Image (cartoon, helix red, strand yellow):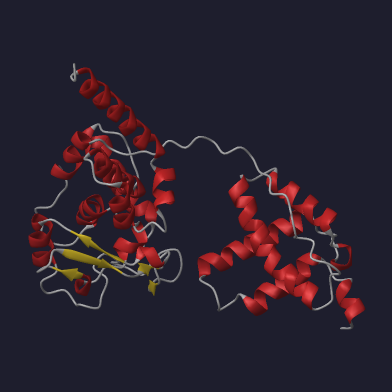
Amino acid sequence: MTKEEARKQYFHEYYENWVRIYKEGAVRSVTLNKYLSNLSWIRKLASDLRLEDLNKTTYQQLLNDYAIFHEKQTTMDFHHQLKGAIIDAVDDGLVDKDPTRKAIIKGKIPAKKKIKYLNQFELHTLLSNLNLHDMNLSWDWFILLVAKTGMRFSEALALTVDDFDFAHQTLSINKTWDYKGEGGFLPTKNKSSVRKVQIDWQTVIQFSELTRNYPKEKPIFAFDSFVYNSTVNHVLERHCRRLNIPVISIHGLRHTHASLLLFAGVSIASVSRRLGHSSITTTQKTYIHIIQELENQDIDLVMRSLSGLL
């Protein structure tokens, strides 16, 4: 194909070929699926857009059309994944100038998302009614451990016996389980996600007994290569409905863990490290409603302290 012929190809054709050459086998399946989803949207919104017609105006129009259906952050992700392919097209002389430079990112106003979590009484009710009498690993034990550590679903699935340091009461989180793909171990979400989490003595005793004869290299909760988030969420939902407490998801247990720590006075920095967030800012944004509630309590405490000075 000559350069002129290449310039006349549709953008979605070029992008599809670029993903196949540069991304297949080089990125995680979850990430590859995002690239393929973007390809579907390019076909839907700009099926007749050719490389030779790709400029700042046509690219901005594509972003604007995508933003009609998506929130701003999703549009930003779309932009970043398209940009990689377009920069290569510019380098190859198939597009005259970089049309992605100074692109304006728009998007739907995100719906207010209220984080669902349990209060201390509700969590106690849930945990005290789990079926933990049978000393065999089950989803109830999974629920207990997530509630006590705040781990992500994929992190908890990847746990092996070797990750427990019972003598020092710690749990090493250093990998995830590919539950959205073919199963198997994957890296953590980010570098900050590799961490050691302190666990209480009761949990130490319970899991040292549960995993006593378990193969050290095998994940203790990935009972099958194909584990679905919905399966465990349904188990948790049944417990919540039976106990007449708010229905939350497994991820809601992570929020519950963090919320209880914050209300107990644990510093935001310590909570951030325990959750494996990439920065304290992430923790602050996620739990801003709790932080504001704590600040209101602090104001009341300050006022009471000042009024007692006279």
Q: Is residue 32 visible?
A: yes
Between 3 and 99, the residue placed more toward the observer is: 99
Between 155 and 224, the residue placed more toward the observer is: 155
- For this orientation, the residue located farthest to the bottom is 1
- For this orientation, the residue located farthest to the front is 310
Asked which quadrant contains residue 220, the reply is bottom left
Between 57 and 23, the residue placed more toward the observer is: 57
Q: Is residue 151 visible?
A: no
Residue plotted at (89% across, 67% down): 52
In the figure, 19 relative to 256: above or below?
Answer: below
Which image quarter holds the C terminus? top left
Q: Position of residue 8 (x, y in %)?
A: 89, 71
Asked which quadrant contains residue 53, the reply is bottom right
Residue 66 vs residue 73: left or right? right
Count of all numbered marks drawn on residues in the image: 0
Q: Position of residue 199 (x, y in %)?
A: 16, 58
Residue 170 vs residue 275: left or right? left
Asked which quadrant contains residue 223, the reply is bottom left
In the figure, 184 relative to 153: above or below?
Answer: below
Q: Position of residue 178 (x, y in %)?
A: 41, 68
Q: Position of residue 58 (x, y in %)?
A: 83, 55
- For this orientation, the residue located farthest to the right is 4
Residue plotted at (14% across, 62% down): 136
Residue plotted at (63% across, 60% down): 37
